[in-house]
Image (cartoon, grey):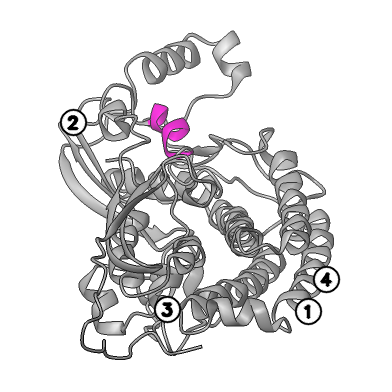
Amino acid sequence: MEPLDVELEEGELELPAEPMHLNMGPSHPAMHGTVRTVVELSGETVVKADVQIGYLHRGFEKMCERGTWAQVFPYVDRLNYVSPMLNNVGWALAVEKMCGIAVPERGQWYRMALGELARIADHLTCTGAIAMELGAFTPFLWWVKAREMIWDVLEEETGARLTHAFGRIGGMASPPTPGFKGLCRATLEKVEQILVEGEKLLLRNRIFIDRLENVGPISAADAIALGWTGPCLRACGVAYDVRKSHPYLKYDEVDFEVPVGTNGDTLDRFLVRLGEIRQSKRIIEQTLDRMPDEGPVSCDDPRVMLPAKSDVYSTIEGTIQHFKLVMEGAKVPAGECYSYTEGGNGELGFYMVSDGSGTPYRVRIRPPCFQIVGGLSKLVEGRLLSDIVPTFGSLNMIGGECDH
């Protein structure tokens, strides 16, 4: 077979070729139903990719400005709906920063444990989906089984499997259940075993490695310029993790490492998430060891905390306090602040403005996905059409976070 790039002989005609435009999404399975990429192709090579978000738009920020500060918790659950507990904690910390409220030590450890469980569930979903979208269906089923075990623990604690609305300004909705520590440790051991089984299937598979290695690479400088954070930035070799660089809760008191990659390609993004699952396991184990078995998980500040039901039903003071907090909301001091935590995909930030009332005056979110998806075209241009699927999957785009 003759090579395709030979020069034409005299008298031969070159047939004109026009670029082909192809829509990937918003209904393509690999586009996760909420993003559309208009691809300009030359053969199977991507010449240009126009990434269009906005197919899931709920006006999240404006909804937050129509209720009380506490009524925002169900909304933030639906930002990254794979790890909603991390969003709950992030919003609670932001409002507490405005109010100058400190959460009891037991409550801080409890938040860390639940948040890291949610992070493991997030990474299991992302890595499993990458494998599934490349045809490796069995590891996906195994890792989703592990994720369901994590959600069993969260359901036991919060009463809800996915969207918990369990955070509270000043603490958590209820203290840990009596069997929380034992259930956590047993579940983490099972998750580790399932993770190893999936790795044996994938990381020794030549086809799987070839589909990820040197696909969709990005330099550290370009990633920083795009505003990337989280596993995608750390895959480029930048060890920026909010839990390490700007510790909150008790993260400065536990020992864990920040996994980083070298090439910034799809394989590195995959491996970094697997590494973070194990680091989250380390954090949870230390958290369980150090979390007191007794004591409050929430502060006793009547400005933000609902009174006990027994007080509501038996005392006029409790009834009035409950009524005022529910109907008018906690009065957050006038001012503005930006609070940020390490979400499942990177730096999750909340910028808020208060006018002193029980309703947020302005709420703006800094979602990690928004910046990361902005770099997708840079990653896929010049690559093959088939490379879009693993590259996009490795960015872990969550439609709820891209909601702008």
Marks 2 and 4, how far apart at CA? 48 Å
Disc 4 crowd rating (10 Å Cα; few below 14, some 14-19, many 20+) is few
Q: Looking at the picture, which amino acid does disc 2 mark?
A: Tyr
Picture disc at residue 361: 2
The residue under label 4 is 193
Q: Is residue 74 magenta?
A: yes
Label 3: which residue?
Answer: 234
Q: Which residues are magenta?
A: 70-77
Residue 219: image location, x then y, percent? 31, 84
Most foreground residue, 336 or 159:
159
Q: Residues within 10 Å of mark 2 (few under 14, many from 20)?
A: some
Residue at the location (26% across, 86% down)?
A: 8
- The residue carrying mark 1 is 200
Which amino acid type corresponds to the residue marked 1 in the rendered image?
A: Lys
Question: Total label count?
Answer: 4
- Tag 3 and tag 2, C-beta contact below 8 Å: no
How far is the residue under mark 1 from the one under mark 2? Answer: 51 Å
Between marks 3 and 2 in the image, the one whose residue lies nearer the viewer: 3
Which mark is first along the chain, 4 or 3?
4
Instruction: Identify the main secondary structure in magenta.
Output: helix
- Image position, residue 151 (x, y; %): 70, 46
* Element carrying mark 4: helix
Q: Quadrant of residue 229?
A: bottom left
Q: Is residue 211 left or right of residue 342?
A: right
Q: Are marks 1 and 2 in contact (CB under 8 Å)?
A: no
Residue 155 in view (yes/no):
yes
Q: Amino acid at mark 3?
A: Arg
